[in-house]
Image (tube, coloured by chain):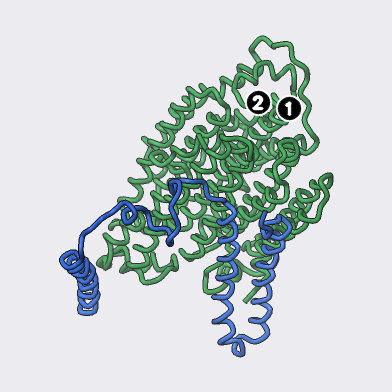
Chain colours: A green, B blue
């Protein structure tokens, strides 16, 4: 038993508890220390994860992938390259969200200790979700993330919309959890085990020519899991909560929702379904799964993009944009190839850094009491040229213009679809990207091409400025580093 | 299947028992209603107001704190039973668990949840 493998989780959990206690004994003026302690903890966990990842890679210095991949407690927690790569993403998201929120939390009088501790616990849940091969432990991580998120959505206590967001998020989230649990119980009924490896046993789904012992039962379980996680990633028939929750929640929390729990849910979907999809190519009951994912992908991206066109509030627009991007990512699942899996992992990274950049600009303006409506961005290039430029870079990345990272994300998904003989899906994706230009360009036009109302300059606070600088740098750098990064994604996807 | 048949018989017997009892009472009891008898029974007190009133949300927080320590006790019992087999690791593990709960208690305390106002 190697405790080293769970050091990132232990650090995050310990920091969360420490922040909670520290905040109780801090005077009002020194509340910022909670945020600084959280940042230090997340950074330490990030370093620990990088070290584990470097040691686990085949060309790394130390142990081969077999060591960490074996996992703890009989595979209940694993530290394979996939888990570690996604954990790096989660920790990075946590760092960015806390940096973006320091001033916001202070100015809106949000309870700083609770806020930072909840973000940490939520990140911890996400790490557990990504790092498990056991249905029960995955559910444990899911609830840890979800319960912290419900509270985060409602932290603006005087604001009725924040309460509404929290309630809607909680009710749909609870429903999703129930559906997921029911699906898990059916899978357990079919395999007699909560371990994911049992899904791949020949007799279970009727794979590799064996007669399916419990095909229909297992398939019903898997479809319920798709529906439940569909809620969590806001795929289209299950997306109604997202715009309201995103609009009402405090903006840094919205930024967190749009990338964090969503990426974690995608990580679980990859963990559960990628091996089944890859094996299912030979035929047999799982053949219906790619069709299901393809249908969800098409509906999700189309509805997300079309509804986003009509939005006036930027957080609602970004909610629909986020729904559309979930649709793109499901293309990588529908193709059911290793390339598709790797493309989803790459897109998760690309979308997360880009969207955090967009939200950094929104929070920049939010701290100055504006920025909720798309019309607030009129003439931003004159009032805050740096914010406008950063927004431009991130929006171009969301549209998918080279050399931003978003382009490569879409490119790999596109190639995976074409290579798998699903060119029609790739075409739908490209058409949708063209539609998305409509609403992203609306902001660009407001920022650069509209007559400027007489307004004074809006300056960023140092924390928001730093976070924005880092995310924009990542949007550009990850674009240029797309080759090594996609190599890493393929490696991670291969270990699933 | 046989064991489930037992459950079914048990369920049906339970349902029938209730209805037979009610029906027998209906047959034999005198039927003389008056306004006092028909009013809501509140432990002999004279009832006033409706039941749709606001309850203090504090009850809920107390219940929550209570449940946490209830669950703690549930976990402590099996731990105590195999304490010797678990050895030092089990002892440390349980103190970590208790420590996390104590942090929750400190939190509730400092937030003045334990005071009745």
The residue closer to the viewer here, A356 or A372, is: A372
Where is residue A48 drawn, in percent x and y?
A: 71, 61
Residue on which disc 1 sits = A368
Q: Is residue B28 above or below residue A448?
A: below
| Image position of A239 (left or right of A82) | left
Q: Please report the residue visible at 42 percent of the width from the left and 58 percent of the height from the top.
A: B42
The residue closer to the viewer here, A346 or A491, is: A346
Please state the chain letter of the residue tagged with numbered disc 2 in the rendered image. A
Where is residue A157 drawn, in percent x and y?
A: 63, 40
Mark 2 → mark 1, Cα distance in angstroms: 8 Å
When asked about the image quadrant of residue A100, the answer is top right
Q: Is residue B81 above or below residue A322?
A: below
Helix or strand or loop: what does disc 1 sit on? loop
Q: Which mark is residue A122?
A: none
Residue on which disc 2 sits = A371
Neighbours of disc 2 within 10 Å: few (<14), some (14-19), many (20+)? many
Q: Are marks 2 and 1 in contact (CB under 8 Å)?
A: yes
Q: Please report the residue visible at 39 percent of the width from the left and 54 percent of the height from the top.
A: A179
Q: Is residue B2 above or below residue B45?
A: below
The residue closer to the viewer here, B111 or A364, is: B111
When asked about the image quadrant of residue B95, the answer is bottom right
Please state the chain letter of the residue tagged with numbered disc 1 in the rendered image. A
The residue closer to the viewer here, A117 or A9, is: A117
Where is residue A285 drawn, in percent x and y?
A: 28, 57
Helix or strand or loop: what does disc 2 sit on? loop
Residue A342, can we see it? Answer: yes
Q: Please report the residue visible at 24 percent of the width from the left and 72 percent of the height from the top.
A: B14
| Image position of A261 (left or right of A293) | right
Q: Is residue A195 above or below residue A404?
A: below
């Amino acid at each position: 038993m190697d405790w080293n493998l769970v050091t990132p989780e232990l650090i995050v959990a310990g920091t969360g508890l420490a922040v909670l206690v520290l905040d109780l004994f801090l005077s009002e003026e020194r509340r910022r220390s909670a945020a600084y302690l959280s940042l230090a903890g997340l950074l330490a966990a990030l370093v620990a994860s990088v070290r584990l990842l470097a040691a686990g890679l085949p060309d790394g210095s130390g142990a081969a992938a077999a060591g960490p991949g074996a996992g703890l407690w009989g595979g209940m927690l694993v530290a394979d390259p996939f888990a570690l790569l996604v954990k790096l993403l989660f920790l990075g998201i946590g760092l960015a969200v806390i940096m973006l929120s320091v001033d916001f939390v202070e100015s809106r009088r949000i309870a700083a200790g609770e806020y930072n501790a909840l973000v940490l616990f939520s990140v911890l849940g996400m790490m557990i979700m990504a790092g498990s091969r056991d249905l029960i432990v995955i559910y444990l991580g899911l609830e840890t993330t979800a319960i912290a998120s419900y509270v985060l959505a409602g932290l603006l206590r005087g604001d009725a919309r924040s309460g509404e967001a929290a309630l809607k998020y909680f009710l749909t989230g609870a429903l999703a959890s129930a559906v997921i649990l029911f699906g898990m119980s059916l899978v357990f009924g079919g395999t007699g085990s909560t371990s994911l490896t049992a899904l791949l046993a020949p007799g279970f789904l009727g794979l590799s020519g064996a007669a399916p012992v419990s095909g229909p039962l297992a398939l019903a379980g898997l479809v319920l899991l798709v529906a439940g996680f569909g809620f969590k990633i806001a795929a289209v028939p299950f997306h109604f909560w997202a715009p309201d929750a995103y609009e009402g929640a405090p903006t840094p929390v919205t930024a967190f929702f749009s990338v964090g729990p969503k990426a974690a849910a995608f990580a679980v979907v990859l963990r559960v379904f990628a091996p089944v999809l890859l094996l299912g190519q030979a035929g047999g009951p799982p053949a219906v799964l790619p069709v299901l994912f393809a249908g969800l992908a098409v509906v999700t991206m189309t509805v997300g993009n079309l509804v986003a066109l009509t939005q006036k509030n930027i957080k609602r627009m970004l909610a629909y944009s986020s729904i559309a991007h979930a649709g793109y990512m499901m293309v990588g699942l529908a193709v059911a190839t290793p390339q598709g899996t790797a493309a989803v992992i790459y897109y998760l990274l690309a979308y997360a850094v880009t969207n955090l950049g967009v939200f950094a600009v929104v929070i920049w303006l939010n701290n100055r009491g504006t920025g909720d409506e798309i019309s607030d961005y009129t003439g931003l290039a004159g009032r805050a040229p740096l914010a406008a430029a950063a927004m431009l870079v991130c929006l171009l990345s969301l549209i998918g213009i080279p050399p931003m990272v978003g382009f490569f994300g879409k490119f790999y998904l596109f190639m995976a679809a074409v290579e798998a003989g699903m060119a029609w899906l790739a075409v739908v994706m490209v058409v949708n990207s063209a539609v998305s230009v409509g609403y992203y360009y609306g902001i660009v036009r407001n920022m650069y091409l509209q007559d400027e109302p007489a307004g004074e300059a809006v300056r960023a606070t140092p924390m928001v400025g730093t976070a924005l600088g880092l995310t924009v740098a990542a949007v550009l750098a990850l674009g240029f580093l797309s080759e090594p990064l996609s190599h890493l994604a393929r490696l991670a996807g291969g270990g699933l | 299947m046989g064991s489930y048949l037992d459950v079914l018989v048990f369920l049906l017997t339970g349902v029938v028992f209730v209805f037979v009892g009610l029906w027998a009472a209906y047959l034999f009891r005198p039927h003389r209603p008056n306004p006092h008898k028909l009013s809501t029974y509140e432990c002999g007190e004279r009832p006033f107001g409706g039941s749709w009133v606001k309850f203090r949300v504090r009850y809920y927080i107390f219940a929550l704190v209570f449940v946490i320590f209830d669950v703690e006790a549930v976990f402590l019992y099996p731990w105590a039973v195999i304490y010797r087999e678990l050895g030092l690791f089990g002892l440390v593990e349980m103190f970590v668990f208790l420590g996390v709960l104590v942090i929750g208690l400190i939190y509730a305390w400092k937030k003045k949840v334990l005071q009745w106002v």
